[in-house]
Image (cartoon, grey):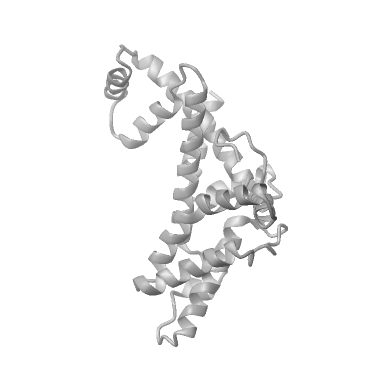
Amino acid sequence: MSGDGLSQTTIWATITTAHSAGPEGQRAMHELVSRYHDAVERYIRLKIRDRHLADEVIQEFWHKVLTHKLSGADQTKGRFRDYVRTVLHRLVIDHFRSKKLQSLPPGELLDPSRPDADYDRVWRDVVIKRVLARLETFEIQTPKNRYATVLNLRLKNPEASIEDLTERLGSQLGREVSPEAFRKTLQRARTKFLELLILELKETIHPATPEDIEAEIYDLGLGHWYRRYSSESNA
């Protein structure tokens, strides 16, 4: 998949390709593992405080992936993150029961209809990280583009004034930058971030209607960014 966000390949297609033989299958498998390794590990360690038991569940998940045990993923189910959550929940519960542990995992693991704030937070972090990486790639590939630099400055310094951020950017670039130029670049950066966010989510939902994408944005707790960035892009 292209890091610039221009790819239209869904993660469901990546799964199918990853379970095929040859170099293309190997590349797809590498993409699948690298894309979700951190999310799987972070989530399991949040749910299972025993380090050794958590390691077993993490290893079993990736063993199933690498040995093509997840190749039967139903592409009609919609959101890929719901599918991953179901697989991880079952693995955790199975391990608790196989170890005959007295205490079962948290209630949301036993009832898939219950919200799981830990899982949503971990998945949201992964989505934001990937979209920012796409924005950084866009900046590298576009001459004199500073979208990623400017947006990261704002995200890392939410309370800083525009004048302060402008001075920091000028120090990084080695030249003077006006506050007005910073504001315009930040507005364009947010618009581009929103565009790349939509593309990122399109890859994880099938089918992906505009309504599906918007619902996913709000479900992930990114509604405040969506509202603000949308209003700025329409200004």
Residue 49 visible in the displayed image: no
Residue 196 found in image quarter: top right
Residue 53 found in image quarter: bottom left
Measured from the top left, where is residue 102 in percent x and y? 40, 87
Tally the numbered discs: 0
Q: Residue at x 30, y 34 (%)?
A: 157
Q: Residue at x 44, y 72 (%)?
A: 56
Nearest the eye: 90 or 193: 90
Q: Residue at x 31, y 12 (%)?
A: 175
Location of residue 13 with respect to 73 vertically, above or below = above
Nearest the eye: 123 or 213: 123
Q: Is residue 70 left or right of residue 98?
A: right
Nearest the eye: 34 or 84: 34
Measured from the top left, where is residue 197 in percent x and y? 55, 39
Nearest the eye: 22 or 9: 22
Instruction: Name the residue furthest front.
Output: 22
Location of residue 229 with respect to 129 vertically, above or below = above
Q: Residue at x 34, y 14 (%)?
A: 177
Indicate the quadrant containing the N terminus: top left, top right, bottom left or bottom right: top right
Measured from the top left, where is residue 169 in percent x and y? 32, 21
Measured from the top left, where is residue 65 in percent x and y? 58, 62
Residue 192 visible in the displayed image: yes
Q: Is residue 197 left or right of residue 178?
A: right
Q: Is residue 170 left or right of residue 88?
A: left
